Amino acid sequence: MKKIAAALALCAVLTFGGTAAAEEYIMSPGDQLQIYVLGHEDISSRRNNTDVSFIVRPDGRLDFPLVGEIDTTGLTVYEFTNLLTKELAEYIIDPKVTVNIAKLGTTRVFVLGEVKKAGMYELTKGHRVLDALGAAGGFTAKAAKKNIFLIRNGQEDNIEKLNFNNYLRKGDASQNLVLNEGDCLYLTANGKLNFFTEVLPAIQRIANSWYYVKRTKNL
């Protein structure tokens, strides 16, 4: 277990450390961006000595002057910068665009079953399987790491099966998928999925408890 915890920590550093990793970050709703267009302060984040953030909406879209809506779904910061540059080129000659993430949005996911702290987590940095497992404290000794179920948006007809050993031991990035709002990771001891008797009730119970606590705090 110590070796697995160390591997999780090391992978987290390798995945999210440095400028290159920032460019590879996949944008998500709630992200606040500082966008600068060289020589065009009127549409940039810095206006009249005031910083203005551009926020990715819940539908994954972002509004920007001149070009209107841009769909950021599935885009890295690098890809978004290139897309915005291309769109602005219709109005500005050879635009020079810089995009920085001022504040990361959160993605709420469920991690259930054979983990140390099952529950719902708001991921504020990375939004991948590794990040969710780390938030839940890692695997228990019984976890079948070859059979992790990824249930997209809590839907029984949209389930993927992951072999996370291939990521930890071989660096197979295809097993460390990006998680979206409402996704659920379910770890078992025997590799069997009981969606209606175990997963769905747990999702509903945790979600109801979380919303109740949030509502109570806001009163």
Image: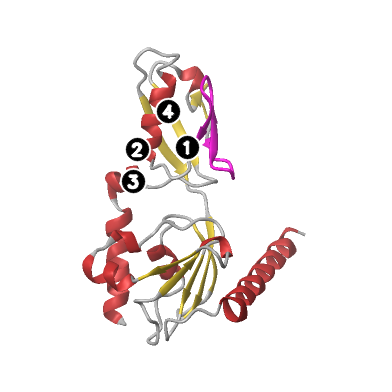
- Amino acid type of the residue that numbered disc 2 sits on in the rendered structure: Tyr
> How many residues crowd around disc 4 within 10 Å: few (fewer than 14), some, or many (20 or more)?
some
Rounded to the nearest angstrom, the CA distance separating label 4 from label 2 is 10 Å
Dot 1: few (<14), some (14–19), or many (≥20) neighbours within 10 Å? many
The three-letter code of the residue at mark 3 reads Glu
Picture quarter containing residue 209? bottom right
Q: Secondary structure at mark 1?
A: strand
Mark closer to the chain start, 3 or 2: 3
CA separation, marks 4 and 3?
16 Å
User: Which numbered circle lies on residue 174?
Assistant: none
- Among all residues in the image, which is located at the extreme front? 157
Give the residue number, with chain letter if any, for mark 2.
Answer: 78
Q: What stretch of residues is rendered in magenta? A: 54-71
The disc at residue 24 is 3
Separation (CA) of disc 4 from disc 1: 13 Å
Label 4: which secondary element = helix
Looking at the picture, how far across and down is residue 193, in whole percent? 50, 78
Question: What percent of the width, then of the height, locates residue 153?
Answer: 56, 60
Provide the secondary structure element on which disc 2 rests. helix
Q: Is residue 64 left or right of residue 137?
A: right
Looking at the rendered structure, the secondary structure element under dot 3 is: helix
Lower sequence index among marks 4 and 3: 3
